[in-house]
Amino acid sequence: MLEDRATAVSSPAPWPAAYPNGYAVVDVETTGLARDDRIVSAAVYRLDARGEVEDHWYTLVNPERDPGPVWIHGLTSEVLEGAPLFADIAEDFAARLDGRVLVAHNAVFDWQMIAREYARARREAPVRQRLCTIALSKELGLPLPNHKLESLAAHFGVVQQRAHHALDDARVLAEAFRPSLRAAAAGGVRLPLLECRPLREWSDSPRIGRQASGGYGDYRQTGWRPSRKRPACPYPNPGRYEDGKRLKQGMRVAFSGDTSVDRELLEDRATEAGLHVASSISRLTSLLVTNDPDSGTSKVVKARQYGTPMVDEAAFGQLLRDVEPAGEQ
């Protein structure tokens, strides 16, 4: 049924030459959601340019710490004790990612966890672009009740067998991605690809133990480097960013949600360009940078209330290349 539907969708139109040559559909299970959390299992389905499965791979990973939400991923300390460390599987993992677009459901999370593990191992993940299937489903206008993987799977008739098992989640996503990719090709839809910049250094942060409640991800979410006070922006605020125009020195820029580049590094680049990095949203904010404008974060909500323009990380990176000096009219 799924194959017939996908074939029917894709056959009328030629395959877009600009589309990637291959994909690595990835799922990782982790000890939590914070920056210092670790991967406990990983799976990759390699797909060709048209979304056909080439092979798949799965491994457990010893996180060298508490496994976190066992009630979700089912991987206890006893199960993971004899598993390889991430450094031991980094080469095999890289071989399956190399030269392909990383595809995941909420891809920024999977990418960040992978990039951090490679940084700890003093290596770089060979990934240059990622594609989030949530973003793709929005581009296609799929009539989904929410953005959960199970809803995307149900839309395409894909049956989940072991939810929150990395290999089965990756299989389900691969089967749902194939018809999504073909629908995009048939409709001439631009794939929502985002740049991935590998981390090149890592320093472990001190962490606290689980709270008595044993919540998911309640390790301290710390930064990559010690926080520091930024110097005051020397330029006056010229007002809001206007779509299609350049950023101008003095504009107040805020950030919300996860970014592929470490947040502090991204803020450094903005400061060096002469922008004012703001920690909150007000009527004076010129621009909000977020990869998920549909999220319910307080910054996104306030930005909508104030009519603050929003762009994603990739667009902001392009804008940073040509910031207008404060003295120009």
Image: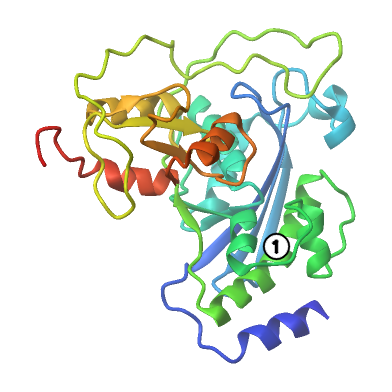
The kind of residue on which mark 1 rests is Ala
Left/right placement of residue 167 relative to residue 141 reads right
Q: Position of residue 154 (x, y in %)?
A: 83, 64
Q: Is residue 157 in view from this perspective?
A: yes
> Is the N terminus in the top left, top right, bottom left or bottom right quadrant?
bottom right
Left/right placement of residue 228 relative to residue 236 reads right
User: Dot 1, crowdedness within 10 Å: few (<14), some or many (≥20)?
Assistant: many
Q: Position of residue 183 (x, y in %)?
A: 62, 76
Residue, disc 1: 174
Looking at the image, is 298 positioned above or below residue 45? above
Pick whichever, 160 or 255, lies toward us: 255
Pick whichever, 74 or 180, lies toward us: 180
Left/right placement of residue 76 relative to residue 268 reads right
Looking at the image, is 250 positioned above or below residue 314? above
> Is the C terminus in the top left, top right, bottom left or bottom right quadrant?
top left
Q: Residue at x 73, y 54 (%)?
A: 170
Q: Which quadrant of the view contains residue 52?
A: bottom right
